[in-house]
């Protein structure tokens, strides 16, 4: 694969939070590549650091967060010339002008809860237009309005001329999420980060929203990072999958590699605990034994060792590196130490 | 919006009538005989004279008739007379209310500007030295009783330094402004600290909300995030507190009035209650009730202006 096909190259991203004077390491040495025009799913249980990872990339972290990364390289493609411009987001000031020019214009984000993601006191049309006007200084209001209307039409919001004048409380959950998506996509960003975009919606609306995103991606060639704990969604949407556990990527690979040949014991356990159609009557759904450890009290070695059915002494001796088992399929498990170590 | 305001105004009328009825009825229950205040001792010895006086004053009429007479008089601007000194109540209020309103309104404006701005700066620079300093003064302002703070100010600025007069509203030796400073400062201190704490907490809550993240994700500047997206949402509860302080300042600045010998309405109310001057008690109670209704009307209008959910829900 050529370098220019990788739109986002994250290396050794670390984020920790300082609470009550103690530093808690939440995201550890996360590295992944997002391919242009593809969807990368990040899966893992609640609290594994998925959300913190993407918030670190766009640099919207709370005050008590500390962030370091070797690089968060974004490669912008100029559609006319085909040229590539590189930006290292890791070096940018979170509140600086440079980073702000990335947010909204190159990076769009769809949040988890559409109910609270829109400002209750402004008209939805104005909220979408604000994102547009911010990155297109001097654009006329009428022109912005046209673009917002077009976006609403693309997103299947009925009667857009009237609805852009409405306030968020006049919209249903699914419609609000469409507005949130409109805000994220109005500037036609290269990367869209969807942080559990359908968790707060009911199942039929979930399907509609995901279809919509898939369609937009196909039409416009966007790259998507999809955070979810819905394995079914991953199977439908993603090309690549990152499995995270306690702040580390324990396994990374293509959808086929992860689903057909899961290597890490955690990935295997995760896939076994998903309900599938055709489960026999008396067959119980498997669960992962034990509970998620407290991130503040983790020792060295593999984070999953305590709950792992295949653990050995060596697991807790030192931090486990990632091994490349087959091309682009990396796993962080000591069982594969005969393979090449990658970072 | 105009329809909304009109509707809220019209809703106040039955409320006021109901309150006036309660006030009038409650005083009937106290068993105070007004005649016993008016009649001179030798007149009181003769029961016939007392009955005649009662008949002339219309006190033998049924309760409802007397009530409507009273309300009718008030609507015509006749508030009745004080029993203790015979002054028309209208004159009494006109003498005392301006001093109270002047003090209340100016303290409110000063503390609103100070409290809200310090609160918001504290929230934006949370856990910075500015925030700690602001919070320190907020706790101090709420912990020190008003009368104590007032006495401290008099000790320092009037007695030790001799800069400002210690009491009264007008005098030959100081300008009205210099008379005004200490009472205003005392009232402002406590209100500023309340408003500061509310503004800070609301602003912090709003800054942690999802729509602020959405706004930041658009790439807009922090100033715009604070001014356009956070401020308006954080101010709604603060304005409610501010408006509902208005009636408290009008009826409840008795402490300030006695510390600074300020000729306001608060002392009129307390004196009337102590002396059993029931016509004054009735009118001033009605006045305080009306100021509460006005405050809640202001709250309704302001929240409707700030929040489309209220505005559109009512229309």
Image (tube, rainbow, N blue to C red):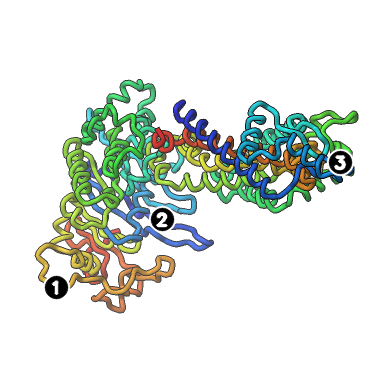
Cα separation, mark 3 vs mark 2, equals 92 Å
How many C-alpha atoms fall within 10 Å of the one at disc 3: few (<14), some, or many (≥20)? few
Q: Is residue A256 above or below residue B54?
A: below
Cα separation, mark 3 vs mark 1, equals 102 Å
Are the residues under marks 3 and 2 on the same chain?
Answer: no
What label does residue A283 carry, if any?
1
Chain to which the residue tagged by mark 1 belongs: A
Secondary element at image label 1? loop
Single out the mark in the foreground, 3 or 1.
Answer: 3
What label does residue B301 carry, if any?
none
Front-lying residue, B37 or A157:
B37
Single out the mark in the foreground, 2 or 1.
Answer: 1
What label does residue A15 carry, if any?
2
Q: Residue at x 43, y 52 (%)?
A: A67
Are the residues under marks 3 and 1 on the same chain?
Answer: no
Secondary element at image label 3? helix
Residue A59 x %, y %: 40, 46
Cα separation, mark 2 vs mark 1, equals 41 Å
Q: Is residue B121 above or below residue B3?
A: below
Residue extending furthest toward the front: B48
């Amino acid at each position: 694969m050529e370098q220019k096909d990788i739109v986002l190259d994250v290396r050794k991203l670390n984020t920790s939070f300082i609470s009550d004077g103690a530093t808690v390491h939440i995201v550890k040495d996360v590295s992944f590549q997002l391919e242009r025009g593809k969807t990368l799913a990040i899966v893992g249980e609640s609290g594994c650091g998925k959300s913190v990872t993407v918030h670190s990339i766009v640099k919207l972290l709370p005050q008590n967060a500390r962030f370091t990364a070797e690089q968060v390289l974004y490669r912008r493609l100029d559609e006319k010339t085909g040229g590539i411009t590189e930006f290292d987001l890791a070096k940018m000031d979170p509140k600086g002008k440079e980073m702000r020019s990335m947010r909204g214009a190159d990076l769009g984000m769809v949040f988890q809860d559409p109910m609270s993601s829109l400002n209750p006191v402004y008209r939805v049309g104005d909220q979408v237009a604000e994102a547009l006007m911010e990155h297109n200084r001097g654009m006329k209001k009428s022109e912005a309005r046209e673009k917002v209307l077009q976006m609403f039409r693309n997103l299947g919001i009925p009667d857009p001329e009237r609805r852009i004048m409405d306030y968020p409380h006049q919209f249903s959950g699914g419609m609000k999420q469409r507005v949130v998506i409109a805000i994220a996509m109005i500037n036609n960003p290269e990367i869209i980060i969807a942080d559990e975009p359908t968790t707060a919606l009911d199942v039929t609306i979930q399907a509609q929203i995901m279809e919509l995103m898939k369609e937009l991606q196909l039409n416009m060639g966007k790259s998507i990072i999809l955070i979810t704990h819905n394995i079914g969604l991953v199977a439908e949407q993603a090309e690549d999958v990152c499995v995270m556990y306690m702040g580390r990527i324990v396994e990374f690979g293509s959808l086929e590699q992860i689903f057909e040949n899961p290597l890490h014991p955690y990935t295997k356990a995760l896939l076994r605990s998903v309900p599938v159609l055709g489960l026999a009557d008396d067959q119980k759904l498997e669960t992962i034994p034990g509970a998620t450890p407290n991130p503040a009290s983790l020792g060295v070695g593999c984070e999953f060792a305590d709950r792992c059915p295949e653990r050995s002494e060596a697991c807790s001796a030192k931090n486990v590196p990632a091994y490349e088992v087959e091309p682009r399929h990396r796993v962080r498990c000591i069982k594969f130490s005969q393979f090449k170590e990658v970072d | 919006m105009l329809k909304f305001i009109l509707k809220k105004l019209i809703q106040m009328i039955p409320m006021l009538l109901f309150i006036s009825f309660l006030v009038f009825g409650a005083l009937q229950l106290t068993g105070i005989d007004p005649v016993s205040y008016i009649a001179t001792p030798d007149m009181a010895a003769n029961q016939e004279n007392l009955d005649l006086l009662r008949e002339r004053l219309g006190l033998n009429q049924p309760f409802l008739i007397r009530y409507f007479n009273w309300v009718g008089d008030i609507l015509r601007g006749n508030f009745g007379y004080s029993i203790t000194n015979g002054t028309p109540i209208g004159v009494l209020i006109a003498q005392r209310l301006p001093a109270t309103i002047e003090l209340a309104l100016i303290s409110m404006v000063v503390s609103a500007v100070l409290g809200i701005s310090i609160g918001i700066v504290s929230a934006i620079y949370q856990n910075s030295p500015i925030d700690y300093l602001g919070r320190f003064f907020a706790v101090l302002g709420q912990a020190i009783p008003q009368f104590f703070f007032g006495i401290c100010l008099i000790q320092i600025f009037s007695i030790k330094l001799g800069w400002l007069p210690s009491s009264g509203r007008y005098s030959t030796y100081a300008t009205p402004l210099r008379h005004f400073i200490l009472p205003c400062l005392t009232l402002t201190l406590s209100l500023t600290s309340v408003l500061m704490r509310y503004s800070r907490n609301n602003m912090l809550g709003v800054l942690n909300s999802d729509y602020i993240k959405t706004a930041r994700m658009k790439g807009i500047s922090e100033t715009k995030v604070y001014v356009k997206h956070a401020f308006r949402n954080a101010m709604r509860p603060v304005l409610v507190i501010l408006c509902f302080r208005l009636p408290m300042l009008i009826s409840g600045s008795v402490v300030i009035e006695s510390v600074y010998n300020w000729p306001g309405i608060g002392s009129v109310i307390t004196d009337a209650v102590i002396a059993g001057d029931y016509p004054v008690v009735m009118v001033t109670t009605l006045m305080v009730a009306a100021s509460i209704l006005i405050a809640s009307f202001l709250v309704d209008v302001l929240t409707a202006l700030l929040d489309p959910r209220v505005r559109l829900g009512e229309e």
